[in-house]
Amino acid sequence: MKEFLLIALGVLVFVVIFQIAKASEYVSVLKGEEKTRRQNNKINAFLLLGLLIFGLIGVWYCNELYYPKTLFPQGSASIEGESLDTMFMITVAVTGAVFILTQILLFWFAFKYQEKDNTKAYYFAHSTKLELVWTTIPAITLCILVAFGLKAWFKITGDAPKDAIVVEVTGHQFGWEFRYPGSDKVLGKKNYKLTKGANSLGVDFDDPASMDDIHVSGTMHIPVGKPVKMVINAQDVIHDVGLPHFRLKMDAVPGIPTTQWFTPKYTTEEMKTKTGNPNFTYEISCDQMCGKGHFSMRGIIIVESEAEYRKWLATQKAEYFTIYPDREPKADTVKSNVISAILPK
Amino acid sequence: MSSAATLHGADVHAGHDAHHEHHHHETFITKYVFSQDHKMIAKQFLVTGIIWAIIGGLFSVIFRLQLGYPESTFPWLEDFLGHWAKGGKLDPEFYYALVTMHGTILVFFVLTAGLSGTFANFLIPLQIGARDMASPMLNMLSYWFFFTASIIMFSSLFVQTGPASGGWTIYPPLSALGDASSGSKIGMDLWLVAMAMFIVSSLLGGLNYISTILNLRTKGMSMTRLPLTIWALFFTAVLGVLSFPVLLSGAILLLFDRNLGTSFFLSDIVIQGKILPNEGGSAILFQHLFWFLGHPEVYIILLPAMGMSSEIISVNSRKPIFGYMAMVGSLFAIAILAFLVWAHHMFVTGLNPFLGSVFVLLTLLIAVPSAIKVFNWLTTLWRGSIRFTPGMLFAIGFVSLFISGGLTGIFLGNSALDLHLHDTYFVIAHFHIVMGVASFFGMFAGVYHWFPKMFGRYLNNTMAYIHFWVTIVGAYLIFWPMHYEGLAGMPRRYYDFSNWESFKQFGELNQFISFISMIVFAVQLLFVFNFFYSMYKGRKVTTQNPWGANTLEWTTPVNPGHGNWPGEIPEVYRGAYDYAKDGHEFIPQNVPVGDDETHH
């Protein structure tokens, strides 16, 4: 019923606009078309000036309202993201200045040089000097921006530090899996053809390196202040590990592993205080369309102190033993053995 | 060259007079359906484009309902979407189908075929002084391939598993595997076949536009006297002819992967517990093939809008376009660079960082010719005597939007910033403003400006002004705030954000955007109404040259017949932009150079 009323209202508005539009055409014939045209010209020139003024106020107001809701006021949660934030601000300053200047010129010229009775257009067909000015200035400015950008780009995409913690991230419809290499610091081999039942990642358990590997779903734990290197792949379609707080993104492509590394600056708890949001969580968003559950492909990262991280790691059971429970060492000896096997020396 | 063109022109003319008698006995079918008159084919493209634009726009309104009101249900949706909206709640699968079809329709069917198809067909012969296209038959086929593509694409909306739903970029493996998504079943095959037809259509059209511009210019119409619209349409056609075949190859390889068991794009896949035998393919290869068209495609959409806006701004400022040669040169630079930047869509695919850096440099270089164009437009307005016809308002709006959307490209083209902004709402804001809305503004400017030439009647001014003002304000209200959502990392193509701690703070804003989008859509319907109403009932054009323009199309009769000029084709003596020169308000191109004229 509500929808019907809305449609009826819409149609009514249409009819009214149409009648006014038709009537205004008759009026213009009566008043003289030239006179009407000049009147319309004035009105539109004023409106363009209004668009400029209210537009700029709107830009400012929009910034007041929504800038606090972006991730920039809280700063980058990774060390690598800091240079990106600086670069972002430089780019905002440069493009912002150009935006304001050109929009003002555009609408001001439109208003100022509207058709008037006693002025004529000025013949001005070209000027090599002016054109050189607005070729070289943008070219130089852009070179500076490119230089800043590439410096950050090569730093972020460069090799991860040797002591980085390695975590393998695997995307599938519609969730994230994480694999830690265990005490030997080597991830066991994988072969997608071995994917079956509980061995959901296709790990090759004949490879000794795989026997201490830990597999967890949905939530990734990492220690604060240490570089983390993600080895990223996907099982079915292309996904993307989106880490907005850390200013990073990397596709997960079936068949082609990618890597990405970063150093988290704040623990999840610290971020809760920093943002004043008790529910704060680092989230992994899938940023590459991957099917109907794309929007729900949410992963969580818990950044914690190194001690907490080690404690968490110690409670995790190697995937090998989950799949082959009968091969697990028995009873009392278990706990200490497993822990000493897993903890990095 | 020019003498050959003249000879040819005379030939066509002589032959045409003999033909002319036959055309008087044209049947409805030969005149309105299988017409070979470039003007009628242009109108066919335009009307088909308008129908597609309504469908594509309506889809965005429906998926904006979901984004703006994720908690609500709309029982009436179930009435016409059936099982795709059970209980009035849009199914996620269908949401993605709508997003995919919205992109496909607007990028290809409206802003490529609807824009280039309409204005290249309509303006090239009229503005260069030719009786018709070089090959009217191919031209007709171009429309009918487009029509066939339209029918196939439209029919995919009605298959049981739904239309393609993997995004307009159809990245495999998602688009290659029926198990990955229900839209990747028969809907995807139809999508690929329709696109193949579409590409054939655009190749036939493009070859025709290029050969017409190069060979059929009237006497005196040297390349440097061409109106900027023609230059823009020329580069557009070159871009299309060189890049569409690459997408065609990608589409065919994808069809093979889907139906013949090949592995061009597939490797190491486990889906729904099934281990696929495909090995050795590369999913990234498809992205290279796609974006090798995909990026030039952006300029295929944008250049005609630039060309038409240049023309309309000059005519209505009553001033020559500032820096004609620089305008042509910057179009040329953009066309070249358009081929060298495609991988900036792929910065986060694991691309070699060094390769990425080359693409950063080339991408940001595009800002230089773009800046030249903007400042030249501004200087054209400076000290003009500006008439705000609806066409002129849309052309000014185009410049404003091109600036706003172009500048955000400087963020995205810089790979390090792209790491944060890639595939977020910032990207949506960027490309909707710079290529979506801006190109639509160019297209509207063109329709308002050339409607009198197309139909011998004017569009209603009051409705036109309402259309302009609501659209420009609405477009900024919709897309400007989206930049902020992108800065918060909010990803594109999400059906619902309410479970995300990082993104759920924008609920109210999303509702606002959805609300505005409905108003803007309604105003576009007002334009469509104005279009069809004025076609039959609009005020009649009484003068040959209502805007006081210099170009040749305004030397034809108010309602030009097939062949355009009843007598000789006029000879051209000057460039298209002699406004305000030597005390004359304007000097059409067919007026010989007087002895007293200064040479600038």
Image (spheres, grey):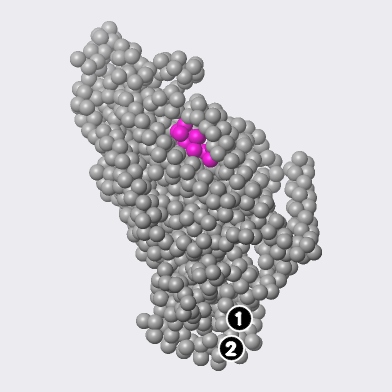
Residue at 57% x, 62% y is A120
**Secondary element at image label 1:** loop
Residue B483 vs residue B114, the one in the foreground: B483
Question: Local crowd at mark 2 within 10 Å, few (<14), some, or many (≥20)?
Answer: some
Quarter of the image containing the C terminus of chain B? bottom left
Seen in the picture, residue A185 relative to A59 is either above or below; the reply is above
The residue at 55%/61% (across/down) is A121
Q: Which residues are magenta?
A: B480-491
Label 2–label 1 contact, CB within 8 A: yes
Q: Position of residue B217 (x, y in %)?
A: 44, 78
Q: Which residue is disc 1 drawn over? A: B561
Secondary element at image label 2: helix
User: Which residue carries the number 2 mark?
Assistant: B20
For the point 41% across and 79% down, the residue is B215
Q: Is residue B595 above or below residue A115?
A: below
Quadrant including the N terminus of chain B = bottom left
Residue A211 is at least partly visible in this image: no
- The amino acid beneath tag 2 is His
Mark on residue A302?
none
Q: Quadrant of residue B45?
A: bottom right
Q: Looking at numbered disc 1 in the image, what kind of residue is underneath it?
A: Gly
